[in-house]
Amino acid sequence: METHVFIKFDSALDATHAKCYLDHHGYPVSFVTPLVYAQAKYQDPTAVDPSEGQIYLLAETPDATKLTDPNTVLRACIDILQDIGLVRGIAQLSDGHPFMLRVEFDSVDAANRAVQILTRNTTWSTFEKDPLKVTVQCKPWSEVRSGTPAVPETLILNGSAFRNHGFDQHNRVRRERILDGSDIRTTVMLRNIPNKMDWLSLKQLIDQHCLGSYDFLYLRIDFSTGCNVGYAFVNFVDTSAMIALLDHIEFRTWKGFRSAKAAEVSYATIQGREALVAKFRNSSVMHETPYCRPRLLISCEDTTAVTRIGTEIDFPGADNAAKLHRSIDNARSMGLFPPHAAGSADRARYGHASG
């Protein structure tokens, strides 16, 4: 009986290296399209972007009269793009200035960050002896290809489980308390995540509205199935950034996934990046497959280099050997969840960052 295993990489280069490695060890391996992968994961095939990892870029300079070499603008674009992520290829769609480019990144995440970064930062300077200002317009290539706007998310105003949750008054994220400064908690739990969603897809969704506003992301994974267990933890660098999460993700269904559940947001029990790092650096989860681990990300407060925003940095190593060994022993003896303890749904309800 044949068993088919589908593995998704963020980087085309990593996928190629993995295929070569498995081919060398005698495993039959082939590349598949995003559509085939989505069907294997029981996702909505109509939401698949066959040109993921690609962007459209329009670049021009208001100082065109000073432009002695049109390629100055093109070189500036390449420098900016390479600073965001590894570029696999660039196709020039125009004869000269202004430049219209189709760009493919090695990483899907780099392409998504490029769209957000270049949409927020539209003016750049060339690295020439006499610098020129370059203005850019950027969008996913799929929008150019299709010529149609994205399908809006479904907003669910009824059916929110908050009304039935006992923690509603304390752990619910309330806009008015954020705005008046009466609630300064920064770590939230995002619930009702489709269990076929991976951390890259979740990051892409959050980045669309909150890129640079958060520095910690952990999508809890069931190690026995490789699927998530329905919730994730996000730590924001400032409380006001959570409003974007409320405005664009809370109470909405998950585009591309066959789930009728709406996203819910509440405060987590463990608060702040330092506390989260202290919790997980000595946890057995850091010895699991990388996609199961929590991640630290560069925020706007961590750097002045906008092209690095949203990239991952190394998680600190363990600093308490005894605690780490206990965590590993507990994971071996109890599995994902301890016996006779509250179930995963109860843990999710009260916002415990288990791991």
Image: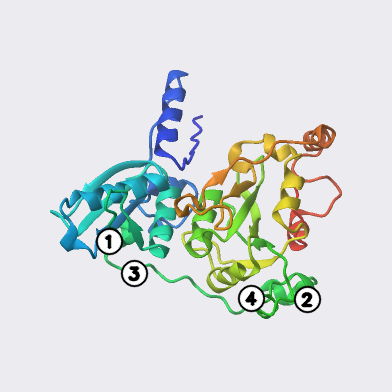
Asked whether residue 355 appears in the rendered view, the answer is no
Q: Which residue is mark 4?
A: 159
Helix, strand, or loop for circle 4?
A: loop
Helix, strand, or loop for circle 2?
A: helix
Q: Please state which amino acid type lies under the numbered disc 4.
A: Gly
Q: Quadrant of residue 162?
A: bottom right
- Which label was assigned to residue 149? 3
Q: Give the CA distance from mark 4 to mark 2.
A: 18 Å
Label 4 environment density (alpha carbons within 10 Å; few <14, some 14–19, many ≥20): few
Q: Nearer the viewer, residue 64 or 195?
A: 64
At 55% from the left edge and 68% from the top edge, which residue is drawn? 249
* Above/below status of 71 relative to 97: above
Quadrant showing the C terminus: top right
Q: Earlier in the sequence, mark 4 or mark 1?
A: 1
Q: Please state which amino acid type lies under the numbered disc 2.
A: Gln
Q: Position of residue 139 (x, y in %)?
A: 34, 61
Helix, strand, or loop for circle 1?
A: helix
Q: Earlier in the sequence, mark 4 or mark 2?
A: 4
Q: Residue furthest right?
A: 340
Asked whether residue 111 appears in the rendered view, the answer is yes
| Image-based side of 72 in relation to 21, left or right | left
Q: Which residue is mark 2?
A: 169
Helix, strand, or loop for circle 3?
A: loop
Q: Give the CA distance from mark 4 to mark 1.
A: 36 Å
Q: Earlier in the sequence, mark 2 or mark 3?
A: 3
